[in-house]
């Protein structure tokens, strides 16, 4: 097998080589990098690329002019990969490691920073703990590095934004049905219809049933999302949307570890009770956005979002094994959250000739009410853990003795209100220099009470700066350097509770330094590369005298390169490689100085390709690789390195009907891609085939 460095060079070469042979005469002319029109009817755009960088700046900015690393997956790539869940899609983004999320939520590591809350939809926060479906999503964007200027608190390692589908003024009806070799299936529908010259409506809906190789695993998802677009005048547009998601599934906590690695030989064994390991979530999100162009270079938009999350899950889970016996514990957890977010932005574009300015000024206010309760489980012997006597018998089932729920052991009630103001200037000087600078001020007011009605309150007022320099030797090439900061209050990213002891401490701080380049060697290809350092500070540490201080620090350094787009008329690709090195640089609550950051593979590779050998027949080939990584900050359990190969075949019956076959884990490799601590390790799925049909009317 070639070395990892050789693989990285080959990945880059697959795009650079065709580019070097291409006619470069067009490089002397200015290209149109504005966002392309979204195609919703007839022939699919078959587009893996995008020119739209507006999510990173809140202004109409080409992606090549954004001074930070951005990865994205378009709707066409999602369809080609037959991916319906956000977590599955993110496995094809290098630099991201997936946490198991305890079997009930999306959870990611971006540049070594763990988060359950840095998720957004159309730039608005969607921070509750649940699984996100993609049936109503047009594009996934991963904006890397500190992002507080645009997104507010958190987003220290990066932010994940989903761009939602919206109603268009074209008639279109499409649908999809698919089923896999484990019995899981999905049905999707997308209906778009103009009602008049000024009003259009769209409905996206899905029904999905889950299954895999894990014993007892099952579940189902129902989603419905109507949207409305109204042209209120030649310069004013109103977009309204509503999403209802209902998700029920088994809560699967994976397998324990043994001798510093995952317990092998039991990849299908369910270490729980299918009658108790259950997850249910109901999510209601309503959004309203108004855009208006005042002409003369001035435009504005305002958005309001209401989100209501109601979720409960319970589980029995493994807490360790010695190879002969396995320890278990269990609990039930309920979470309710209600969010209101209001945001308004003004954009003023001015200047001509050698000086052009794009100035952003905005305000955001939000309120969030959360309640989190928990009940633990006791087994017949009165303990919270029990032991199975014969681990070798676990290949089929596990014996769970009788148990009962204890009284509520945790009840955290929190109210959060925020107010933010931000400004940003994008200044273009001549044809070759662009400056980006901005500042955000946040007021963060958190009030919490625990089960004993003990109050923990904290008010933070923080400034978050951002600065970037972009040099463009040609219109097709940008070289940038950037600096950005973000912060996270000591309550953590879900803000359920801040104890009186922790309420005295200022927020954690994230500082990102980055140098990178973006190059468009072909009209539909973008190559990007970045070198970065991300520093985290103000982490709590309790010293030998029992005094807690904000002296904990960590650092992540790395390099990434990617290429995406239509390389030739028959080849579309999204390729990437990331190198990451991170450690605790001082003692903290996470561990001792010198420990490597958890779930931080040194090398990660993702490569998805589609080859169309004729108008009717196409093939897909994908590769995912992550080198070995520690399951937790203990650095005692290693998730082994792995390679996963996926494949696909496509057959276009007619302009309105197509068939496809997707194979995941083509070579049936045993691998362990994610964990939640040292003893909840998720086995990867074995060989799996999915066949689907897609139609358009």
Image: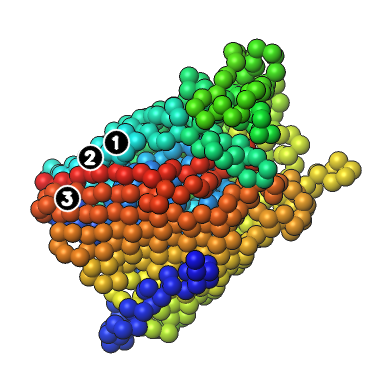
Say which label, 1 or 2, has the lower sequence index.
2
Quadrant assignment, res 457: top right
Say which label, 3 or 1, has the lower sequence index.
1
Whether tag 3 and tag 1 are in contact, CB under 8 A, the answer is no
Whether tag 1 and tag 2 are in contact, CB under 8 A, the answer is yes
Residue tagged 3: 658
- One can see residue 219 in this view: yes
SS under mark 2: strand
x, y percentage for residue 580?
59, 62
The label number, if any, that marks residue 641 in the structure image:
none
Within 10 angstroms of label 2, few (less than 14), some, or many (20 or more) residues?
Answer: some
Within 10 angstroms of label 3, few (less than 14), some, or many (20 or more) residues?
Answer: some
The label number, if any, that marks residue 185 in the structure image:
1
The label number, if any, that marks residue 177 in the structure image:
2
Residue 466 appears left or right of 546: left
- For image coordinates 48% across by 23% down, the residue present is 274
The answer to which of 465 and 380 lies nearer the viewer is: 380
- For image coordinates 76% across by 36% down, the residue present is 501
Whether tag 3 and tag 2 are in contact, CB under 8 A, the answer is no
Q: What separation in Å lies between label 3 and label 2 (alpha carbons)?
A: 11 Å
x, y percentage for residue 223?
32, 34
The answer to which of 668 and 519 lies nearer the viewer is: 668
SS under mark 3: strand
Residue 572 appears left or right of 253: left
Q: What separation in Å lies between label 1 and label 2 (alpha carbons)?
A: 7 Å
The answer to which of 467 and 277 lies nearer the viewer is: 277
């Amino acid at each position: 097998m070639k070395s990892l460095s050789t693989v990285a060079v080959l990945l880059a070469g697959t795009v650079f080589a065709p580019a070097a042979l291409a006619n470069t005469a067009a490089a002397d002319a200015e290209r149109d990098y504005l966002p392309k029109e979204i195609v919703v009817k007839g022939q699919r755009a078959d587009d893996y690329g995008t020119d739209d960088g507006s999510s990173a700046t809140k202004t109409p900015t080409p992606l090549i002019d954004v001074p930070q690393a951005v990865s994205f997956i378009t709707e066409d790539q999602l369809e080609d990969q037959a991916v319906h869940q956000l977590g599955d899609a993110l496995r094809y983004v290098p630099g991201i490691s997936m946490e198991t999320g305890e079997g009930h939520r999306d959870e990611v590591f971006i540049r070594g920073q763990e988060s359950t809350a840095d998720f957004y939809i159309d730039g608005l926060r969607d921070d509750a703990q649940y699984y996100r479906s993609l049936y109503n999503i047009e594009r996934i964007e991963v904006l890397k590095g500190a992002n507080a200027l645009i997104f507010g608190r958190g987003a220290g390692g990066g932010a994940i934004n989903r761009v939602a589908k919206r109603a268009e003024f074209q008639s279109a009806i499409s649908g999809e049905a698919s089923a896999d070799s484990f019995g899981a299936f999905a049905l999707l529908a997308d209906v778009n219809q103009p009602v008049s010259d000024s009003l259009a409506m769209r409905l996206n809906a899905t029904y999905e049933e889950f299954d895999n190789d894990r014993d007892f695993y099952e579940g189902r998802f129902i989603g419905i999302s109507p949207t409305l677009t109204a042209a209120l005048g030649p310069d004013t547009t109103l977009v309204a949307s509503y999403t209802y998601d209902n998700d029920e599934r088994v809560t699967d906590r994976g397998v324990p570890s043994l001798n510093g690695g995952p317990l092998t030989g039991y990849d299908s064994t369910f270490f729980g009770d299918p009658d108790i390991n259950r997850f249910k979530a109901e999510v209601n999100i309503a959004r309203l956005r108004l855009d208006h162009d005042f002409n003369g270079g001035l435009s504005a938009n305002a958005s309001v979002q209401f989100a209501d999350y109601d979720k409960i899950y319970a589980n029995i889970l493994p807490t360790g094994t010695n190879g002969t016996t396995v320890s278990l514990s269990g609990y039930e957890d309920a979470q309710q959250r209600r969010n209101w977010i209001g945001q308004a932005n003004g954009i003023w574009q001015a200047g001509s000739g050698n000086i052009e300015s794009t100035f952003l000024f905005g305000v955001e206010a939000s309120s969030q009410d959360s309640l989190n309760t928990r009940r633990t489980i006791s087994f017949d012997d009165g303990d919270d853990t029990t032991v199975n006597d014969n681990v070798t018998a676990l290949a089929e089932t596990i014996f769970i003795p009788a148990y009962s729920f204890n009284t509520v052991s945790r009840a955290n009630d929190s109210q959060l209100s925020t107010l933010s103001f931000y400004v940003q200037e994008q200044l273009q000087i001549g044809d070759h220099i662009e400056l980006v600078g901005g500042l955000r001020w946040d007021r963060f007011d958190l009030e919490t009470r625990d089960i004993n009605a003990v109050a923990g309150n904290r008010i933070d007022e923080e400034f978050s700066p951002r600065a970037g320099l972009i040099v463009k030797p040609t219109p097709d090439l940008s070289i940038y350097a950037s600096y950005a900061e973000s912060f996270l209050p000591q309550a953590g990213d879900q803000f359920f509770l801040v104890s009186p002891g922790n309420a005295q401490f200022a927020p954690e701080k994230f500082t990102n330094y980055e140098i990178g380049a973006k190059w468009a060697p072909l009209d539909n290809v973008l190559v990007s590369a970045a070198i970065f350092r991300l520093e985290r500070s103000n982490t709590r540490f309790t010293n030998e005298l029992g005094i807690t201080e904000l002296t904990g620090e960590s650092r992540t350094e790395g390099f990434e390169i990617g290429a995406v787009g239509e390389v030739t008329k028959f080849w579309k690709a999204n390729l990437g490689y990331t190198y990451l090195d991170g450690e605790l640089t001082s003692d903290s609550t996470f561990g001792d100085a010198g420990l490597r950051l958890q779930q931080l593979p040194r090398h990660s590779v993702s490569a998805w390709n589609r080859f169309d050998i004729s108008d009717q027949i196409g093939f897909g080939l994908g590769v995912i690789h992550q080198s070995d990584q520690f399951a937790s900050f203990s650095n005692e359990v290693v998730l082994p390195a792995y390679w996963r190969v996926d494949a696909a075949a496509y057959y276009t019956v007619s302009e309105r009907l197509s068939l496809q076959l997707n194979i995941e884990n083509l070579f049936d490799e045993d691998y362990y891609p994610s964990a939640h601590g040292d003893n909840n390790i998720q086995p990867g799925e074995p060989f799996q085939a999915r066949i689907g049909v897609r139609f358009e009317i």
